[in-house]
Amino acid sequence: MNNALLDQVARTVDRQRLIDTAVALIEVPSPTRSAGPAADRLAEILSADGFSVQRHDADWPQAPIVMTALDSGRPGPTLQFDGHLDTVHLPYVPPRVENDTLYGSSSADMKGGIAAALEALRVLRTLDALPAGRVLFTAHDHHEGPWGDARQVRAMIREGLVGDAVMLPEYLATPLPVAGRGLAIFQATIRRDGEPVHEVLRPPGTPDVVAAGAQLVNRLHTWNEELEQNRHPLVGHDSTFVGNIQAGEIYNQSPAECLVQGTRRWVPPTGSAAVQDEFSQLLAEVAAETGTAINVDFAVQGGAYQIDSDGRLVHAFQQAHTALAGAPLPLGAKLFVDDGNIYASEAGIPALTHGPAATGAHTLHEATPVEELVRVAKVYALTAVAFCGEV
């Protein structure tokens, strides 16, 4: 990658324009399933910049996805920049910039990253830098679980509104994640026949749903120790975790229902269906042993995956990063689950998560250094040039 292009990209990134874009997006609260106004704001920004904007329901007409493309006019691959506009359901914190740091809800997760990816798109257009192919820019709702179920990303895949590879500007600056664990959020509902009743009035033989819940928690704890044996060199090991158990309304009531909630994570190459089947079998065993009925909501947030570390996307990114920083990023794993898991595990589309070194995701104290947003804009622009021009 030549120095002239690097200098041109660095000069063309407009720091204030990037900040203004991020602030404009953060100004619109957008908890999951309510990101329509934020999507409208993004569409307005793109249109004002002269981009041709498309909107698609993508299985959620309340917030149609926002899509635009920068086409070189020459045959070649499509690199997708994709981000989610929705946020976790925490009190809204308005945007502000202090000490060269952007604060506010979604400044880290992930409207700051979306603004940086958009700035990269502007730079590529201004410089007419794409040697071939095109860059597809998309943004959507329904990312954050358990409120969302990734339906828009899955609809985009079904409808072909995707690229040959995808970059996601989530808050992960290092390492370069080429693999990740799958994640399901589960809620097991343990029930017995009848209504809640005072403990001393229980008919003989009434199943104890609280005891059944405790037994399930213990079984999952023991199983977690066994799951740790299933390991992957990059992403660690399988796990199951219980974070919440609820039952009853008062200390001496025999409840009719008990809820156990937690997570199940797994390493590649195990598939989501096999994991769910195994989990359901364990619940069936506990139900039989305790005389209860157990139903489970097993919501897969994203499957386990591993992409080719020698593939076109990784090579293009490392070329761009080396040009900017003097060295490639070390390869590693993604600790959290994002939409890249879905692209890679369900559609076979290589996906890389790389964004600003931000802090405070899923808290009231999100913060992103402006310099990090500028850096991400540069590396995205250079990655697109390398990806679309690589032979």
Image (cartoon, rainbow, N blue to C red):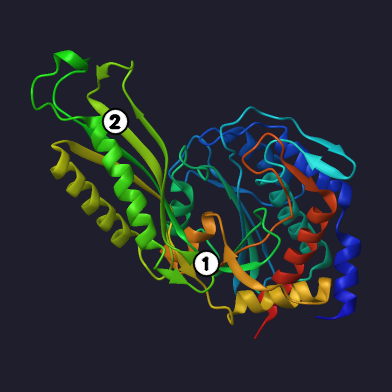
CA separation in Å, label 1 and label 2: 33 Å
Residue 129: mark: none
Looking at the picture, which amino acid does disc 1 mark? Answer: Val
Looking at the picture, which amino acid does disc 2 mark? Answer: Cys
Give the residue at mark 2. 258
From this viewpoint, is residue 199 visible?
yes
Residue farthest along the front direction in this orientation:
200
Q: What element carries label 1?
A: loop
The spot of residue 218 in percent (x, y) is 32, 45
Q: Residue at x 54, y 54 (%)?
A: 338
Q: What element carries label 2?
A: strand
The N terminus lies in quadrant: bottom right
On the picture, is 251 further left or further right than 53? left
On the picture, is 149 further left or further right than 388? left
Above or below 15: residue 43: above
The spot of residue 91 in percent (x, y) is 63, 27
Neighbor class of circle 2 (other Cα within 10 Å; few <14, some 14-19, many 20+) is: many
Give the residue at mark 1. 235
Q: Could you tell me if the residues under marks 1 and 2 are in contact, i.e. CB atoms within 8 Å? A: no
From this viewpoint, is residue 264 visible?
no
